[in-house]
Amino acid sequence: MKTRLPLVLAAAIGLALAGCNDNRTGDETVSGPGGAAPYADNAAGVADAPAMNDRTAADGLANADAGNTTGTLGMAEGASGTMSQAAALAAVMAVDEHEVAAAEQAGGRDLDDAVEEYADQLENDHRRNLAATRALLDSTGGTAGADSPELDAMRQKHRTERERLAGVEDDAEYQRAWLEAMVADHTAALEMLDSQLIPAATDDPVREHLQKTRQAIAGHLETAQQLRDEAGTANR
């Protein structure tokens, strides 16, 4: 029998958590169950970019995956060798794609109810952010480079992590490993946003989108930590 873990609200600046989505498709993935604040309306000036709390936004992303980006994009192609804002947006897309795929994988396992809910919410939130980021990238004239060495390395790291998790046969052990991975992933995403991606933004809409993405990921991280810690306490 599954045990529902008690949750506290994720940070107020985090994502509003979407409801469970049983129609899991795509190969891409932020906030915990109970309702952290939304990836608020993304990128002023991008009229068609869906907000993270728009429940209909995921419909057009059923076939989105890590291999659907095109073009060439170096991670350090801006002025003075710094990362370009197009590269920054492409990196956010790579994170979103991985988190959707990781959430989909978790959906196939027998996990605690609260962890399943969290996985559903990660998938829904990251799908919306992926759509908004892609629309913003298109509006700025950039392309997400599938053959950028840095992005390729990031995607390979993500694939390796998912393959490692898929090899964990016991569902209870998988849940522990998956929550640890979510903590590590969102910690790394925050560090990348702070040190590279947000500083790369030269346009206000891009900067605003990246800052809201950061707020959302911080909320996801807090919830992942809560779920991991509460699961550890319950198993003692």
Image: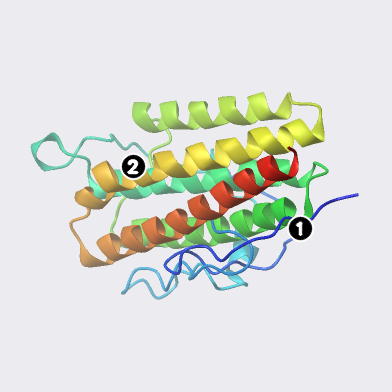
Residue 160 location (% of width, % of height): 57, 24
Relative to 116, is 205 on the left or the right?
left
Give the class, few, some or many, for how many residues have Cα within 10 Å of label 2's Cα (few <14, many ≥20): few
Q: Quadrant of residue 149?
A: top left
Q: Please, is residue 161 above or below residue 202 in the view?
A: above
Residue that label 2 marks: 191
Residue 23's mark?
1
Residue 21 location (% of width, % of height): 72, 61
The kind of secondary structure element at disc 1 is loop
- Identify which amino acid the numbered label 1 is placed on: Asn
The kind of secondary structure element at disc 2 is helix
Give the class, few, some or many, for how many residues have Cα within 10 Å of label 1's Cα (few <14, many ≥20): few
Between 15 and 158, the residue placed more toward the observer is: 15
Q: Quadrant of residue 46?
A: bottom left
The residue positioned 72% from the left and 43% from the top of the image is 106
The residue positioned 38% from the left and 56% from the top of the image is 214
- Identify which amino acid the numbered label 2 is placed on: Glu
